[in-house]
Amino acid sequence: MAPSDLHGVISTAGPRKVRQTSARHRQASWLCGVTLVGSLLCVGVIFAYVTAGRLGAYGFSTRASFLYLPLAMLLTFLLGWGQRTFPIAAALFFAYLGVNQTASDGFFLVGEEHAALTFDMVLAVPLILTAFLGRGAPRRVAQRALPNLPCLAWGGILVGGILSTAVAVDPGVATATLVSRIVLPALVMWGLYRRLGGIDDFRVVWFGLFVGVFSITLFDFRRMVLGAGYALGQEDHISQRWLGVTGSFSIPLLFVTGTALWVASAKAEANSVGKAVFWVSFAGLAGVLVWLSGGRAPTMGIALLALWWLYTALAGSLVRMRLLLLVLFGSAAVAGIIVFSVSQTTQNVNLVLERFLLNIPQGIEGESRWMIWTQAILQWKESPLLGLGPNNWVVLNPYYESVHSSVIGLLYDIGLAGLVSYGLLFFWTLAASRKATYHNLAREEQRFFLGCRAGWVVMMVTLAPYLSFTSGQFKNSIFAYVVFMFPLLVMLVYTRHGAPGAVDDVHGPAAQGGAGYAGRRAGDRAGGGRRGTCSLSG
């Protein structure tokens, strides 16, 4: 064999072996994460059932938290220091957010309904400590630095929240909300940005969120369709919403469902039709439960996601028969779920339509939320720049639990300064999520990225006329985390994967991105320029 041939064998065998090792590592990471999170949730649920008699004064989610919280904190301290185990520790936290968001459970560790210490706030502490004290993610060759714009936006969010708290009508409520809805989510996200190596680590965290959302979806299916656990006598009335997918749960459900649909396309392209049908079936189940709950905005969000995905999937099926098979088999599975659910449930299956039809003659001014928004705008004009303080809407308007709009909520809570800061961050997120950022990813990773983008966009559009993520019921802090998840993913992909020829200094070529990473190219620049950038080095 000629030396040049031998060199070719070595140069191609090395990266291939690294890619195979990397793929096994990625699969083991998310499998361990899903298994651990799922097991811990199951243990918490079993504990809640077993202690129903002795601890019956506490809600179901609180009883589950009594066991989940100490175990998750211990595991976070054990796993959070390792570079490869840190994503699993983060997955434990995001899985719990769905359990903690039960607004009807009025138990708090300290405080009361509008200013309290919740379980998720306690669980965030060890995650933040390990995120900032542990070793940062390894640097990559050709890694790009983060531009100044998102850094300034994050800073503006924190400063705006602090200033609005200082001038709040009730500083106590504002301070507690500031910590819960702004400070802790920002610290968690920047800690994750510091420790996560790339999109593979982020997917482990996303799977943690999915396991938590999926478990609650199954519980809601049990109550809404199978008829177990009825607590209200007006199942066919507006109270039907409280038996299933509540507004606070439908928001993270939209984000997860969008990702699930695009992951289904990736699985179909990889000849894993069974896995693809599972993800489509989950989306169908989510749609049925949202429909039965009577929530108008979430129902429209699910419909928008389905149309968006069908458009991309059908367009791709013209050249990929496997996608067409996914659409056919997936549609059959979803149809089966719908027929079974409608035939089994005792709920009013037309509630959402009745709510839409009820408002048509009256128009938007006949909508109860129009009155709330009008009142909020009038009060906001008293302090337009800094707002009236986080969650001070419930202080001045105790009869309403939320301002029912993310845009008006931002204005009311932290004023124009905060709205502009959030707007800049979200604008940069969309602008930086273009193909030039994610084109170095593998095909399946691109699908995951696009699914997160679709779910996040629809979720944010749904939040605009629906709920506020900077105020409202205190246990709904999951909003404040899921709205930042896609911006975090864009920050990771932009810096870790966006530069041509990005490779890992420690684990070798393609250590994080598998076959999707391009090799080094002649003339690649190491950082894409250092002007106008910020960094959080490890």
Image: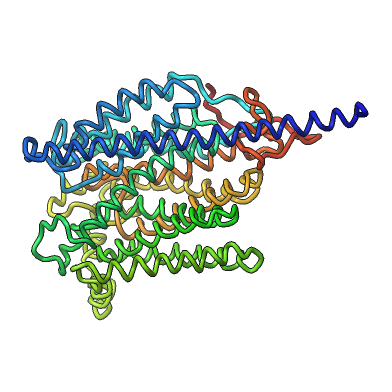
| Residue found 45% across the figure and 48% down from its top | 423
Q: Residue furthest bottom?
A: 361
**Above or below, comparing residue 164 to residue 260 in the picture:** above
Please state if 494 lies on the left or on the right of 72 as rendered: right
Q: Quadrant of residue 531?
A: top right
Residue drawn at x 12%, y 54% as measured from the top left? 399
Spot the residue most to the front: 1
Q: Nearer the viewer, residue 481 or 146?
A: 481
Tell me where residue 504 appears, x and y as whole percent.
64, 28
Quadrant of image for the N terminus: top right
Instruction: Answer whether residue 529 is visible to the viewer in this image.
Output: no
Q: Position of residue 191 (x, y in %)?
A: 44, 29
Horizontal placement of 373 versus 24: left or right? Answer: left
| Location of residue 377 (image quadrant) | bottom left
What colour scheme has been applied to the protein in the rendered image? rainbow
Closer-to-camera residue (178/192): 192
Say left or right for 501 vs 242. right
Tell me the residue at 44%/52% (across/down): 456
Q: Position of residue 496 (x, y in %)?
A: 60, 34
Q: Nearer the viewer, residue 444 or 529?
A: 444
User: Is 526 located above or below residue 382 in the figure?
Assistant: above
Q: Residue drawn 38% across and 62% down? A: 284
Q: Is residue 15 above or below residue 371?
A: above
Q: How many marks?
A: 0
Is residue 43 in view from this perspective?
Answer: yes
Q: Position of residue 40 (x, y in %)?
A: 30, 34
Q: Give the quarter of the image for residue 296.
A: bottom left
